[in-house]
Image: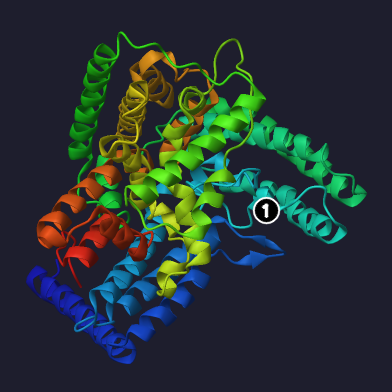
Amino acid sequence: MPDTRAFRQTILLAGLFCLVAGCTQKNEFAEKHRSNRYEDLVALFEEWRSFQKPPLVEGIFDYSAPARAKQHRELAAYQQRLATIDTSGWLVAQRVDYHLVKAEMNGLDFDHRVRKPWARNPAFYVMLFPDQSDVPAREGPVIHGAIDLWRYEFPLEPEPAAELAAQIRAIPKMLAPAKSNLVENARDLWLSGMRSLKQQSADLSALANKVGDAALLAEIQSAREATEAFCAWLEKETPSKTGTSGVGIENYNWYLQNVQLVPYTWQEEVTIMRRELARAHAALRLEEHRNRKLPQPATVASAEEYDRRFNEAVTEYMAFLRDEEIVPIRDYMDAALRARIGSFSPAENGRREFFSEVSYRDPVVMRTHGYHWFDLARMKSEPHVSRIRRVPLLYNIFAGRAEGLATGMEEMMMHAGLFDARPHARELIWILLAQRAARALGDLHMHSNEWTMEQAIKFASEWTPRGWLSADGNTVWFEQHLYLQQPTYGTSYVIGKIEIEQLLAERAQQLGDAFTLERFMDELNTAGMIPMSLMRWELTGETRMAAH
């Protein structure tokens, strides 16, 4: 029998040797890369953004298991390099940039450890996007090489037609290895992913009707056939998909705090959303009682009326922002809103999708949410001085600021007097808030694996007033699917709004008589599309996040 004491000492010494060796290697690494220069952070950011993309193999991005594992291993070196940068003495804005880069790296780590969209989520392989998103980058996990169809002007000239054909040619090539990549067992993601892929087939069909170039038509047909074959494979594999799709509460909390930089937990957000849902419903009933003797406004009923009233809504809203000194006005703002007016659509069986139900009753209401288009126009016309903030943050880290301010403007403009002459419009504001809180609870309870996606849809539909969010409509399905793919996104509208309200209160307290709403809004715009916790640090000097 061996001498156990000597054996344990040997193991202990061996472990100590490994620890010392590891520390020595880390110290050598730290000494080699140590820096206190902001320029080195920017340079690392550029390298990081290039590294974040999967490698190209025969013209397509490689999402295979070996390639993913290799990237995850190599991520540690980037995180170590970031950790060697000493931000002591930097401006707060520069230290904020440091935390943005750190959050992005955490986002990739989370994808590899938990979310794994390439292995769990068939919708990840959707490549064709006909419509522009209203936030800096498309919501949810999006495959590299995705096609922004909205960037093309039809009818196509020969050069853009050839470019689009080359992009669409990648669709069958990406779908072929997807069958080997999708190895995880997440039933709701699987089922909703089929819906998304079927929509891609329909979008390809619609695209084919808009083009006449023979080579492009051939690529579209090939992509559609590949998409439909992929859908058939998904259908065949469905019976084997029985697992949950949520990330779990512990992972949700980690994602909130380390990627989205939100200073709340899953449980705190549940409490907040329940309170906001009750507040919205109670306020709506009081508003309805107040307005009970007033005639209901007529809904938009024709294309001519639509064009007139929606353009008048932009004019009214822009005049309000200017005359009431709410936001510093830029030349591009009016055009940004008018470009998103859209066109009239008749109701189907007496119903419209949720946001049309709101807009067709009072077009001004959703112009307030159109702050999104101001944000995008600003990013293009007035690029941020920081290279790191000049481009959209990865992993939807911008969500709290983008969705929070757009949502917050609805209620803030109501309180500022925008709807004083049309009291029924105030009812619409509370309906919007109720819908945001109800769908956010779906996000939270799907990711805790307490609700299925179907249950989240049912809850959101039932708790949205007036039956305007139909459980079989496109809106509720799109939203809950997005929130299942992108944890915390469903809560970002209300949480971001609350954080902005908190910051407004703190900034007013800090500035005293020097505070104005226009100054506050200008500060938000100038800071860029960053998490509200970092915005708070930059504007007030206070932070709830651990400063490096």
Q: Is residue 245 left or right of residue 27?
A: right
The quadrant in which residue 462 appears is top left
Q: Quadrant of the N terminus?
A: bottom left
Look at 32% across and 60% down and name the residue there.
522
Q: Quadrant of the C terminus?
A: bottom left
The quadrant in which residue 456 appears is top left
Look at 26% across and 25% down and name the residue there.
280
Vertically, is 432 above or below 69? above
Amino acid on which the number 1 mark rests in the picture: Arg
* Residue 194: % across, % down: 60, 32
* Residue 539: % across, % down: 22, 64
Of 416 and 535, the residue lying toward us: 416
Vertically, is 488 above or below 466? below
- Residue that badge 1 annotates: 151
Q: Name the outermost residue toward the right.
A: 214
- Using the rendered image of the protein, determine whether residue 247 is visible from the camera's viewpoint: no
- Using the rendered image of the protein, determine whether residue 392 is visible from the camera's viewpoint: yes
Q: Name the outermost residue toward the front.
A: 323
Vertically, is 7 above or below 182? below
Look at 30% across and 51% down and name the residue there.
255
* Residue 325: % across, % down: 32, 52
Vertically, is 284 above or below 210? above
* Residue 375: % across, % down: 45, 55
The quadrant in which residue 88 appears is bottom left
Count of numbered tags: 1
Look at 28% across and 43% down and name the residue there.
497
For label 1, the SS is: helix
Of 144 and 121, the residue lying toward us: 144
Of 370 and 68, the residue lying toward us: 370
Q: Is residue 347 left or right of residue 488?
A: right
Q: Residues within 10 Å of mark 1 (few under 14, many from 20)?
A: few
